[in-house]
Amino acid sequence: MTINSLTKNTKHLLHALYQSGVRHFVVSPGSRTTPVALLLAEYARQNKNIKLYIDVDERSAGFFALGIAKRLLEPVALLGTSGTAITEYTSAVAEAHISHIPLIVLSTDRPIELQDNGAPQTIPQHQIFGALTKKFVVFTLQDEQPDVTSYIDFMTQKLVHEIVKAPKGPLQINLPLRKPLMPQLNELTTIVVPPLKFDKTADSMPPMQLSESRVVIIAGPNEGNDYQSELLNFSKKYHVPVIADVLSRTRQKATIYGIDALIKANILTAIYQPDLVIRFGATPISARILEWLKSKNIPVWFVGEDTLADHSRHVSRVLQVSPTSFLSQISVNNDADFYQQWQHLNQKKRHITGEASIAHVLDRVLPDQTAVFVANSMAIRDMDDVFTGQTTQNIYANRGANGIDGIVSTALGMSSTSPRRSVLLTGDLTLFHDMNGLMMARQYHLPIDIIVINNNGGAIFSFLPQAMAESYFDMLFGTPLNLNVSKIADLYELSYVKIKTADELEQVMKTPVTGTRLIEFESNRSNNVKAHQQLMGGVQHE
């Protein structure tokens, strides 16, 4: 049998993706995906290194793939069908764009002769994600011209390399396809993709001796490789305090935690003011720390390979190297007393009650190196305020767009690649936004505990000025849904436990379970506001 162009070029595309480091594929099946989906399934059966997931909900699929890429720091491919199905990936692509995640969308499309003339399930898919993708290309898989095959081989490897190079970002590969769509299965022609090798550019800088003696490092959310050991060794050697965002993957006993609560309580007096702050990573969870730096006019350097993230516009110097390279070339004679003053901040008494107590218990009971995904709004703020990183630094969240879209699916994607049981900490409203994602937990028996803080609505709005508009607040912002979490668990055939106090969580977490478990903790929004106001001892106002 002679291999036809559709089969040959599709196989070349899949082999080129694999050769470029793509090992995980998430498929949202549809008629137009037929040739790619079938040949991918065949390829996955032949190559055990390929992990293939089927997610029939495109919105969930996009975030599931995002979770895999976020956890593994490698490109992940999404395959979807033509029409509005592709638009459902937009939220995940937006998050990948802002968070520098190499997400690859294989968008199967209708051919040119069906565009703009009323053909069903046909919309303009050419660069449909606009500025949200770093790169875009069209491959005509049914073109018999030999140059097309070599073009697919070359451009696939080139573009995947481009999106895994800082600043990382998504790629759309649009695939217009005509009927007939059936490829040749069990076709034995050997596929050879000429490798395109890229020499790594040097990530280095000359040695630098800092003249300042009161230097502080802020380790923000980490979108790249871990540098925890290098940072802690540097901090100890040169007596440099480290304020570690809970998403930095560096937070532990020797780093400063809960900076937002410390600033809100007016604890950072003049004795803590540094001569220079060095920032790593993305925008910190704490908005107050950036405001504090700007209000005190403290010089700030930004270190990182990705683009500068500073909406406060208070960075004076940018060094485009990795934190690891920077730390290996910098030395400083920091004031030892200044260092100790900062270290003592971790001893400040926290009065942890209410919803924050769940994060506090997790800090105490999680097994070593547990991967934890945290929803936005209140959950991530609680983690940043009280989680010290005693047992794990592997904390993740979708802090690019700061939304609650797709949190469940992203956490499940993360869980699918984790060597041990994972945890998702979320609220009831965020759970509701991505309930469809729970189908992947059932389908793949994913080992994860989903802890749902059920305060019947959007708790974060209770901390904002609109809470004073009492006549309209619940209708417009509190938005109580009266969800029955136990019935959600029944719908997806998941284990379910309800706890009344945070201390009960410890025993639940020690109870073995297979697959996914929903753990519900009921809370009251008004009481939660009071609990947060008393966190540092006295009543503080937002």
Image (cartoon, helix red, strand yellow):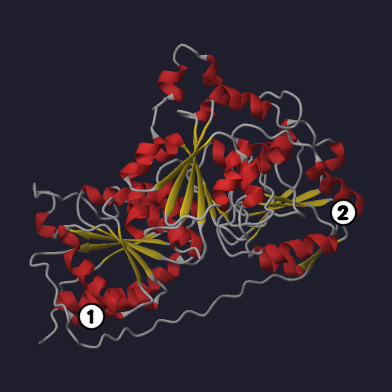
Residue at position x 37%, y 43% from top? 489
List x then y, in percent, for residue 57. 28, 50
List x then y, in percent, for residue 350. 74, 36
Q: Quadrant of residue 231?
A: bottom right
The quadrant of the image that shows the C terminus is top right
Using the rendered image of the protein, determine whether residue 489 is visible from the camera's viewpoint. Answer: yes
Q: Quadrant of residue 29?
A: bottom left
Q: Nearer the viewer, residue 40 or 161?
A: 40
Q: Determine which of the numbered discs, if any, sits on residue 323 in the image.
A: none
Disc 1 or disc 2, which is closer to the eye? 2
Q: Nearer the viewer, residue 51 or 147?
A: 51
Measured in 3D between alpha carbons, the distance from the residue under mark 1 to the one under mark 2, in whole angstroms, is 61 Å
SS at mark 2 in the image: loop
Residue at position x 29%, y 56% from top? 55
185 displayed left or right of 43: left
Q: Nearer the viewer, residue 277 or 383?
A: 383
In the depicted structure, whether residue 274 falls above or below residue 44: above
Q: Quadrant of residue 102?
A: bottom left
Q: Determine which of the numbered discs, if any, sits on residue 147 in the image.
A: 1
Location of mark 2 (residue): 213
Using the rendered image of the protein, determine whether residue 210 is visible from the camera's viewpoint. Answer: no
Q: Earlier in the sequence, mark 1 or mark 2?
A: 1
Q: Do callouts 1 and 2 mark residues in contact (Cβ within 8 Å)?
A: no
Residue at position x 43%, y 38% from top? 430
* Local crowd size for mark 1, using a 10 Å CA cut-off: few (<14), some (14–19), many (≥20): few
In the depicted structure, whether residue 178 falls above or below residue 253: below
SS at mark 1 in the image: helix
What kind of residue is marked 2? Ser
Residue at position x 60%, y 38% from top? 502
